[in-house]
Amino acid sequence: MGMVADDLSPLAIKSGLKTRFVGQRVSYYPRLSSTMEVAREEVQQGAPEGTVVIADEQSAGKGRLNRVWLSPKGSVSLSIVLYPSMVYLPSLIMVASLAVVHAIKAVTGLRAQIKWPNDVLVNGKKVCGILIESGVRASSVDYAIIGIGINVNLKVSDFTDILPAATSLSDEVGRDVSRLELLRRLLVEVENSYLSLPQGEAVYREWRDKLITLGRKVHVSSGEAIYEGIAESVASDGSLLLRSLDGSLSQISAGDVSLCDLNRG
Ligand code: BTN
């Protein structure tokens, strides 16, 4: 590793951290299966809101739609435990992806964009994946876990599986980036954005405006169904409004789809 601060110990993360609760309790592992699993166990043991589980490496990182998420050394893998009320649950993808965009900008100067619903891209390539899990009973939320995986200091060309759609921050800026600085900034951004949700639609509007997807031709697969058309807009619950070639409009929930391609054809 280069000359940048890279110690992700709880002490280094928490020292002087300007948050009320996000990151005030940290479980750090050099290597574990998945931070989502460990965070769920912590929830069962009564973890306070804002608890962070972080790992240098995951052996069984989980991606969306049961995909595997590669989390080698040099990446950052974390899960954040929250207890939101039901109305804010759909906003968590917006909170998380915007926080990542802001933290990347602050620490590297890079301008990241969001591919609906919550991939973060730099120069058109994926640099971060986000996974939200929640436990919902009747009409109340037991817990929500935001999982964030960022390719920070890795040479993506070493990982042929994820080429050519992926990149890393170090590949984009041409030097190592402090994972510690990035992480601490990210925790502050997540908390600020999360706490601002009751004040109105600012988070939704900023997320919508940072989506590169709108106005473009997309393929969306949702379970068995495949939609094709122009991504017209997004609703404040995060769902995508897709105009098909026959003129009909479909509303597709962010929870159960993957975007196959932005502008194939
Ligand atoms: C995606 O498919 O784009 C989402 C990837 C989410 C990866 C993160 S890394 C931290 C957390 N722990 C996991 O096992 N997955 C998420």
Image (cartoon, rainbow, N blue to C red):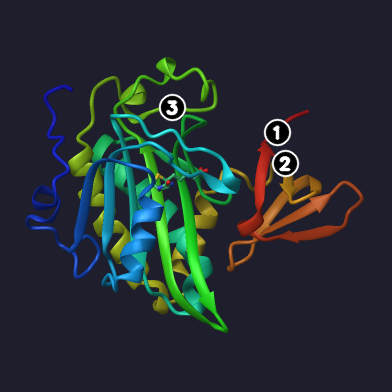
Please report whichever mark, 1 or 2, sits nearer to the chain's N-terminal start: 2
- Dot in front, 1 or 3: 3
Amino acid type of the residue that numbered disc 3 sits on in the rendered structure: Thr
The residue pinned by badge 2 equals: 218
Left or right: 16 as drawn, with respect to 158? left
Residue 263: assigned label:
1
Q: Could you tell me how many numbered marks the image carries?
A: 3
Please report whichever mark, 1 or 3, sits nearer to the chain's N-terminal start: 3
- Pinpoint residue 252: horizontal percent, then vertical percent: 71, 58
Secondary structure at numbered mark 2: strand
Crowding at mark 2 (Cα within 10 Å: few <14, some 14-19, many 20+)? many
Q: Is residue 236 above or below residue 152?
A: below
CB atoms of marks 1 and 2 within 8 Å: yes
Please tell me which residue lies in front, 248 or 67. 67
Please tell me which residue lies in front, 253 or 249. 253
Please tell me which residue lies in front, 27 or 230. 27
Please tell me which residue lies in front, 183 or 82. 82
- Pinpoint residue 86: horizontal percent, then vertical percent: 50, 78
Q: Quadrant of the C terminus?
A: top right
Amino acid type of the residue that numbered disc 2 sits on in the rendered structure: Val
- Pinpoint residue 227: horizontal percent, then vertical percent: 80, 47
Please report whichever mark, 2 or 3, sits nearer to the chain's N-terminal start: 3
Q: Quadrant of the N terminus?
A: top left
The residue pinned by badge 3 equals: 167
Taking the spot 29% from the left edge, 64% from the top edge, the residue there is 191
Taking the spot 55% from the left edge, 47% from the top edge, the residue there is 64
Amino acid type of the residue that numbered disc 1 sits on in the rendered structure: Asn
The answer as to whether callout 2 falls within 8 Å of ligand 1 is no
